[in-house]
């Protein structure tokens, strides 16, 4: 297993009222971004469904300069209906994300949970303070 030091949370930058299901996101990453697969290890849809992307053994494609040593989790959403960055996580997404983070921390106890914006100040993603919300796990 590769050494994982970060668990990075992302949003899909999808406005409220629009859907970006797992397969559509995967298709975009493969056919428009030139990736071999979806860049994330996990994708959480608005209904709280969790979809497995890349295996943990595979390096992701979700955060420049940090892919080698991280796990990428993306939730569907992150923009208001008007396209403004916002924490649009549903209760179901919050519950799924919390359960997933607890599970990952159990097997990756040294990994630090951060948001994409914590590693790239030009990003607003995931549109909430992941360190504040999940840093104590």
Image: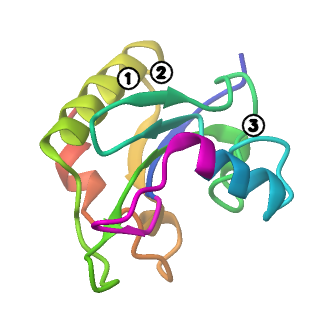
Q: Which residue is mark 2?
A: 108
Q: Earlier in the sequence, mark 3 or mark 1?
A: 3
Residue 94 horizontal/vertical position (percent): 20, 40
Q: Which residue is mark 1?
A: 105
Q: Which residue is located at x 46 percent, y 33 percent?
A: 111
Q: Which residues are magenta?
A: 12-24
Q: Which residue is located at x 80 percent, y 51 percent?
A: 30
Whole-number angstrom distance, CA of label 3 to CA of label 1: 18 Å
Quadrant holding the N terminus: top right
Residue 79: name its quadrant. bottom left
Q: Who is closer to the viewer here, 63 or 38? A: 38
Can you see residue 72? Answer: no
In front: mark 3 or mark 1? 3
For label 2, the SS is loop
Identify whether 29 is placed above or below 124.
above
Q: Does residue 22 belong to the magenta stretch?
A: yes
Whole-number angstrom distance, CA of label 3 to CA of label 2: 15 Å
Q: Residues within 10 Å of mark 2 (few under 14, many from 20)?
A: some
Identify whether 26 is placed above or below 4.
below
Identify whether 86 is placed above or below 61.
below
For label 3, the SS is loop
How many labels, in total?
3
Is residue 51 toward the left or the right of residue 132 in the image?
A: right
Query: What number is the disc on residue 59?
Result: 3
């Amino acid at each position: 297993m590769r050494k994982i030091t970060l668990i990075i949370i992302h949003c899909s930058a999808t406005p409220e009222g629009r859907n970006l299901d797992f397969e559509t996101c995967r298709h975009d990453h493969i056919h428009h971004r030139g990736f071999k697969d979806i860049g994330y290890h996990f994708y959480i849809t608005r209904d709280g469904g969790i979809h497995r992307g890349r295996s943990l053994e595979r390096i992701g494609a979700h955060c420049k300069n940090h892919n080698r040593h991280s796990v990428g989790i993306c939730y569907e959403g992150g923009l208001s209906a008007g396209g403004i960055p916002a924490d649009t996580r549903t209760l179901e997404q919050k519950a799924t994300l919390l359960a997933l983070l607890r599970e990952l921390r159990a097997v990756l106890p040294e990994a630090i949970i951060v948001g994409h914006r914590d590693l790239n100040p030009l990003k607003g993603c995931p549109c909430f303070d992941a360190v504040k919300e999940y840093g104590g796990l």
